[in-house]
Image (tube, rainbow, N blue to C red):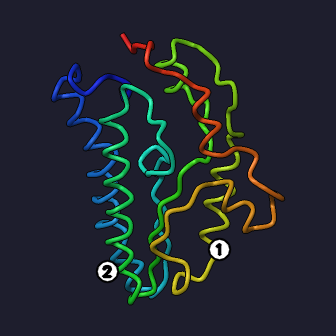
Amino acid sequence: VATQPLLQMPPKRLDLLWRINVRAPAVCIQACAPGMIERGFGHIINIASLSSQVRGTQVPVGYAGYTSTKAALVRLSQAAALELQPHGVAVNALAPTGLVETEGWLRIANGQRLPNPEPVDYLGRAVAWIAAQDPARFSGRFLDSQQVLVMAGILERPALTFADLAQVDVSKWTDG
């Protein structure tokens, strides 16, 4: 769904990316935040992408739609954090440090395996650690999973960096 050059992407597909990656989290925040505000406590953790940030010059061809929506999700998370923090509700954006071999990834990659996949449990463990933090002091952040696991003392140092992602060239892949 995500990997297609912008000039070839049908508007319907671009709309789908925006609905899934930005609108859906915004609607979830609207649905969940009132109960959290009522309790005076809560955590909202949106799943972002490192490709949405200027952490390097490597953004694979075909990711304009995807990365733009994930960048919007990060900004949504930061803006919501400002609104909700006075009510005891934290909002953070968390990205996997490395690429994760999901069923969706394997589909768009035509079954090609990643040379450096991030272990699937890293993201879940990072979410759990963030949710255990004090929302009054841990909100409005953009974090990556291995950075969080280092802060939590689970990893000594990140196993992957943004530079490792350059090993994957999706410019020749299609999801046809």
**Image position of 78 with respect to 173: above or below:** below
Q: Secondary structure at mark 2?
A: helix
Give me the residue at 46% from left, 19% from top: 108
Does residue 1 appear left or right of residue 149 in this picture?
Answer: left
Question: For the residue marked with disc 1, what is the amino acid?
Answer: Ala
Q: Which residue is mark 2?
A: 83
Number of other residues with Cα within 10 Å of mark 2, as a class: few under 14, some 14 to 19, many 20 or more: few
Q: Nearer the viewer, mark 1 or mark 2?
A: 2
Number of other residues with Cα within 10 Å of mark 1, as a class: few under 14, some 14 to 19, many 20 or more: few
Residue farthest left in this picture: 11
In terms of image quadrants, where is residue 144? bottom right
Q: Secondary structure at mark 1?
A: loop
Give me the residue at 49% from left, 76% from top: 139
Q: CA distance from mark 1 to mark 2?
A: 21 Å
- x and y percentages locating residue 167 in the rendered image: 62, 27
**Image position of 116 with respect to 147: above or below:** above
Q: Earlier in the sequence, mark 1 or mark 2?
A: 2
Residue farthest front in this picture: 57
- x and y percentages locating residue 96 in the rendered image: 58, 47
Q: Which residue is mark 1?
A: 132
Does residue 13 appear left or right of residue 162 in this picture?
Answer: left
- x and y percentages locating residue 97 in the rendered image: 61, 47
Question: For the residue marked with disc 2, what is the amino acid?
Answer: Glu
